[in-house]
Image (tube, helix red, strand yellow):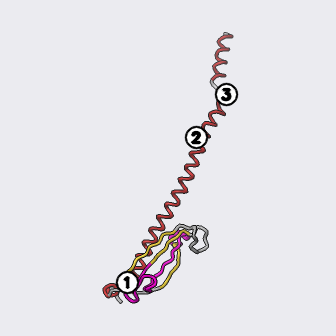
């Protein structure tokens, strides 16, 4: 009976992990988790940059189409600045110019140069800095009576 009790007691004590085994298992897990977490952090940063660039592309094309409609209907020249805060993206800003000046590639009263630059204002100073990412769209549109007629002018 004493021998049986000793064997049962010995089985219970060998069923537990030693401190060395726990430390080794923890270090193996940490060695695998640290690089995985670093890769996840880098992936999240890259995804945020891709999302910002995609938004800039969509906003730039939309703003360009809007300005082409304005020029077609009214032949209005000028420059505008703004942001997309109404859509929840106050850090994405734009500058645009509409000119028929020959120095900018236009022909007075016949051909207008329209340029839209969309940028991510990372530092919040409402100005395009050299280090901030940007996308520029430029096109030209001619002055046609049909455009003005369709706009109701």
Check disc 1: other Cα within 10 Å, few if <14, some if 14-19, many if 20+.
Answer: many
Q: Residue at label 2?
A: 32
Where is residue 60? Give x, y as percent: 45, 71
Q: Residue at label 3?
A: 18
Q: Residue at x 45, y 67 (%)?
A: 57
| Of residues 125 and 19, the one drawn nearer to the viewer in this rendering | 125
Where is residue 53? Give x, y as percent: 49, 64
Alpha-carbon span between mark 2 and mark 1: 60 Å
Is residue 24 one of those drawn in magenta? no
The mark closer to the camera, 3 or 1, is 1
Bounds of the magenta segment: 85-114
Residues tagged 3 and 1 counted as in contact (Cβ below 8 A): no
Side of 111 relative to 117 (left or right): left
Where is residue 8? Give x, y as percent: 64, 17
The mark closer to the camera, 2 or 3, is 2
The earlier-in-sequence mark between 3 and 1 is: 3
Q: Residue at label 1?
A: 72
Is residue 110 one of those drawn in magenta? yes
């Amino acid at each position: 009976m004493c021998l049986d009790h000793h064997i049962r007691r010995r089985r219970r004590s060998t069923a537990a992990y030693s401190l060395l085994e726990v430390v080794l298992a923890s270090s193996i897990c940490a060695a695998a988790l640290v690089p995985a977490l670093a890769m996840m952090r880098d992936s999240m940063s890259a995804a945020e940059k891709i999302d910002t660039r995609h938004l800039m592309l969509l906003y730039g094309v939309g703003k360009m189409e809007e300005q082409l409609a304005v020029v077609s209907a009214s032949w209005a020249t000028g420059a505008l600045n703004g942001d997309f805060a109404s859509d929840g993206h106050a850090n994405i800003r734009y500058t645009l110019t509409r000119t028929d000046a020959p120095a900018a590639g236009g022909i007075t009263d016949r051909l207008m140069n329209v340029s839209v630059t969309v940028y991510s204002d990372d530092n919040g100073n409402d100005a395009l800095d050299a280090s901030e990412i940007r996308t520029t769209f430029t096109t030209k549109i001619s002055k046609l009576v049909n455009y003005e007629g369709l706009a109701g002018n």
